[in-house]
């Protein structure tokens, strides 16, 4: 318009694409920062629905006695220690084993107040569901601000049902659940050029697990690239220093053997032998072999149609991917368990950042979102969230009542050895360790074993070893209290 004076933005001010809504229809004026950051009601509804879905899944798995000693049992013993006012120990690792010598995760102390209210492994599962569900809020808010409500809803749902989150909440409880919302808030701040907020949200990751300091370091490098070199260097240095302190000082100091037991990237596949040749192999060709690693990497990016590769935010996933693929533990390579929990907020933040950077047309944005939704729905039935619509999930095996009736005969505070999936049913009120595990506390007062576990699920003893061990226990002073529906309950007579 004539007579209008256009003022240039101050030097150093980042320019952003015009504000959009509902697949790219530009509005005339950019909303205030307050309105941009406001969480609309439907975002809370989405987060709440995901919370109930995650909670229902994990609680139902536990009710069906499908949760495990490793890891729900271990983490309840850790939280129980904090709740009782002392440093965490886990009988499942070894008698009175100090867990801070295994993984540096002091953030678990935050679960203790919830455990005071509900002294049960269920408390941990509910906390985990809340943490993971909360992570959808910053991603949806950022997407709404930049791409509109429809795009935000699609991205929020695709993220919420993503296979990495489903695998995590579908397998017990893990400390890395705390990392999920921290990463979501940090990366959305980073993508919005709120660099100081990005650093503040990232730094608590140092208290979640020892390897996440490297993730903090990568966030620092991206902050430096985004323009605040000083803040970026400080953040990266803090992350690197945090991991080194945890690995080289805190863990060895707390570990009874005086050494760090989990150099994942130095574990040798198939045995303890290694050496320089093995190390070089695992950190070169070994990063992409066997094919399971490539499959996992492809599946990580598939819900974003590989568009996440166009964002520097994806760099932040590198430390996690590298230590997993360099590990000699085959469980780290695949898509099961909780190992991809921390990758999902990174990948979806990178996806969103790439969409914003592309300044896509309405039709192009629609195609990307439709493709992401289609891919997410295609993958969904292969992972645990799909269990919620399976009738078998809601049926209760009559054996479960038998198991609880027998476990009720074990008094509170007793020392117990139990089979894998019975352990989490006892961790809230007994001193329980794993039956057949070499480091379990010897000569417990009680033994309870489920002998009808399928052969491929028997662990740590196979069927024959378990039968021989029970027979041996009977000759060593244990009497049979009950033998019903495959459950054997023994009590020490002397």
Image (cartoon, grey):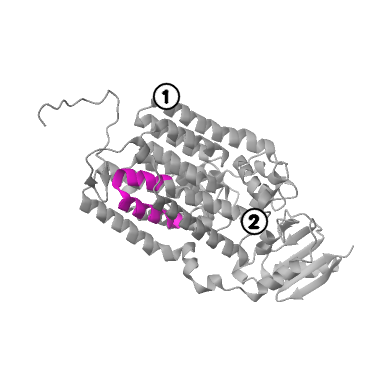
Q: Is residue 196 above or below residue 116?
A: above
Sequence-wise, the earlier of marks 2 and 1 is 2
Mark 1 element type: helix
Confirm whether the magenta stretch covers residue 204: no
What residue is pinned by disc 2? 121
Q: Are marks 2 and 1 in contact (CB under 8 Å)?
A: no
Give the magenta-colored segment's residue range.
Answer: 138-164
Give how far across and how far down residue 101 sits, in percent. Answer: 66, 41
Vertical relation: 401 (above or below) 268: below
The quadrant in which residue 460 appears is bottom right
List x then y, in percent, for residue 441: 77, 54
Quote the CA–CA distance across marks 2 and 1: 43 Å
Tell me what residue is drawn at x 27 percent, y 23 percent. 10
Residue at 70% x, 76% y is: 485
Q: Residue 267 placed where, x, y %? A: 56, 47
Q: Nearer the viewer, mark 2 or mark 1?
A: 2
Q: What's the magenta bit mostly, secondary-structure-wise?
A: helix
Is disc 2 placed on a helix, strand or loop? helix
Between 262 and 65, the residue placed more toward the observer is: 65
What percent of the width, then of the height, locates residue 19?
Answer: 26, 41
Q: Nearer the viewer, residue 472 or 158?
A: 158
Neighbourhood count class around disc 1 (C-alpha, 10 Å): few under 14, some 14–19, many 20 upward: few
Q: Is residue 382 left or right of residue 129?
A: left
Query: Which quadrant would residue 85 be assigned to in this image?
Result: top right
Residue at image mark 1: 230
- Most extreme residue toward the left is 2
User: Foreground: 488 or 295?
Assistant: 488
């Amino acid at each position: 318009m004539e007579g209008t004076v256009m003022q240039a933005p101050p030097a150093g001010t980042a320019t952003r694409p015009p504000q959009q809504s509902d697949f790219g229809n530009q509005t005339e004026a950019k909303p205030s920062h307050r309105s941009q950051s406001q969480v609309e009601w439907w975002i809370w509804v989405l987060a709440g629905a995901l919370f109930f879905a995650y909670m229902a899944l994990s609680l139902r798995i536990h009710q069906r006695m499908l949760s495990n000693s490793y890891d729900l049992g271990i983490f309840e013993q850790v939280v129980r220690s904090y709740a009782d006012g002392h440093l965490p120990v886990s009988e499942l690792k070894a008698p009175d084993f100090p867990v801070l010598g295994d993984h540096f995760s002091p953030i678990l102390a935050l679960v203790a107040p919830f455990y005071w209210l509900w002294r049960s492994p269920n408390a941990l599962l509910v906390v985990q569901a809340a943490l993971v569900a909360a992570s959808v809020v910053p991603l949806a808010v950022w997407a709404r601000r930049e791409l509109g409500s429809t795009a935000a809803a699609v991205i929020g749902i695709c993220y919420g049902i993503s296979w990495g989150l489903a695998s995590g909440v579908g397998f017990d409880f893990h400390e890395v659940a705390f990392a999920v919302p921290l990463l979501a808030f940090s990366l959305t701040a980073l993508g919005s050029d709120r660099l100081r907020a990005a650093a503040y949200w990232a730094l608590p990751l140092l208290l979640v697990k020892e390897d996440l300091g490297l993730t903090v370091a990568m966030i620092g490098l991206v902050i430096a690239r985004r323009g605040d070199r000083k803040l970026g260097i400080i953040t990266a240095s803090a992350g690197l220093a945090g991991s080194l302190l945890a690995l080289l000082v805190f863990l060895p100091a707390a570990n009874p053997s005086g050494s760090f037991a989990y150099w994942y990237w130095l574990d040798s596949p198939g045995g303890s032998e290694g050496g320089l040749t093995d190390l070089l192999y695992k950190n070169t060709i070994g990063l992409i072999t066997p094919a399971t690693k490539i499959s996992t990497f492809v599946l990580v990016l598939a819900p974003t149609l590989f568009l996440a590769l166009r964002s520097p935010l994806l760099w932040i996933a590198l430390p996690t991917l590298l230590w997993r693929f360099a590990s000699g533990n085959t469980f780290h390579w695949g898509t099961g368990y909780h190992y991809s929990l921390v990758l999902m907020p990174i990948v979806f933040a990178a996806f969103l950042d790439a969409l914003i950077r592309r300044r896509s047309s309405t039709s192009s944005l629609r195609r990307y979102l439709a493709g992401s939704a289609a891919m997410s729905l295609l993958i969904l039935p292969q992972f645990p969230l799909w269990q919620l619509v399976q009738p078998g999930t809601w049926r209760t095996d009559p054996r479960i009542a038998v198991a609880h009736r027998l476990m009720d005969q074990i008094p509170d505070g007793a020392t117990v050895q139990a089979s894998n999936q019975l352990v989490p049913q006892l961790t809230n009120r007994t001193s329980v360790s794993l039956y057949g595990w070499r480091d379990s506390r010897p000569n417990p007062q009680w033994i309870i074993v489920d002998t009808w576990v399928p052969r491929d699920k028997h662990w740590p003893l196979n069927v024959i070893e378990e039968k021989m061990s029970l027979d041996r226990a009977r000759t060593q002073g244990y009497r049979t209290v009950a033998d019903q529906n495959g459950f054997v309950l023994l009590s020490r007579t002397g």
